Amino acid sequence: MTNKLTIEAFKAMLDNALLRIKEREEEFSQLDAVLGDGDHGTAIVTAFTCVTKAAASGTEFKAMLGDMGMGVMLEVSGSTSTLLGAFFLGMSDHAQGTELDAAGVKKMFAGGLANVRQQTKAQVGDKTMMDALIPAVEAMNACSSDDIRELMQAAADAAQQGAEATVAMQARFGRARNYGERSVGSMDSGAASWSCMFSAFAENL
Ligand SMILES: [Mg+2]
């Protein structure tokens, strides 16, 4: 039972996410190449490297998450960085101290989603990273356990299912929507990478 998330445990989750994202860099770029410019693997690795670098010197949640969000937005251009930055900045607004209980973890991730919603109007079903992020945060909130490991596993499972569901979807958002029916049949690259992040978080707790 993990009933407290310490700042050190959270940093280890971030490091594991970078490791897992790097392992799948080529796959994310190939998925992006089906409907876009094929740079998503590079973009997410670059952005997440910046995030973990900013986290390394953190000593408490609010300031550390703020540094992570601002750091990635200022140092890396593009929508991947903007969305990831918005996520961590939103988390920063709803976290404090050096350890969080289950309620605190839920509040932090819900804050992240709320701030990403300020950056994109994409909903579940539009074939974007929101197909992984929205179900992940909703599943975490619906989980009544005080065990943070269970919360993160619920989020990871929902993100994975959400990402898999994008295979059958037609893109309705961004440049990808121009592909119409040709967009059906492959997973959205952003949904894949965000789901990878949630899986890595759960794996490392
Ligand atoms: Mg791209």
Image (cartoon, rainbow, N blue to C red):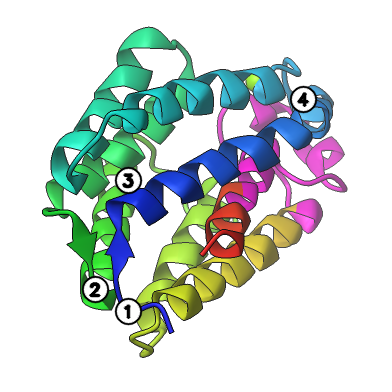
Q: Which residue is mark 1?
A: 3
Rounded to the nearest angstrom, the CA distance separating label 4 from label 1 is 37 Å
Q: Which residue is mark 4?
A: 29
| Coordinates of residue 51 in the picture (x, y in percent) | 41, 28
Give the vertical position of 198 relative to 64 (above or below): below
Q: Nearer the viewer, residue 192 or 57?
A: 57
Which secondary structure dominates the residues rendered in magenta? helix
Q: Which mark is residue 202?
A: none
Tags 2 and 1 in contact by the CB under 8 Å rule? yes
Which of marks 4 and 2 precedes in the sequence?
4
Which of marks 3 and 1 precedes in the sequence?
1
Q: Which residue is mark 2?
A: 101
Which of marks 1 and 4 precedes in the sequence?
1
Q: Nearer the viewer, residue 25 or 58?
A: 58
Rounded to the nearest angstrom, the CA distance separating label 3 from label 4 is 24 Å
At label 4, the amino acid type is Ser
Magenta range is 167-196
At label 2, the amino acid type is Asp
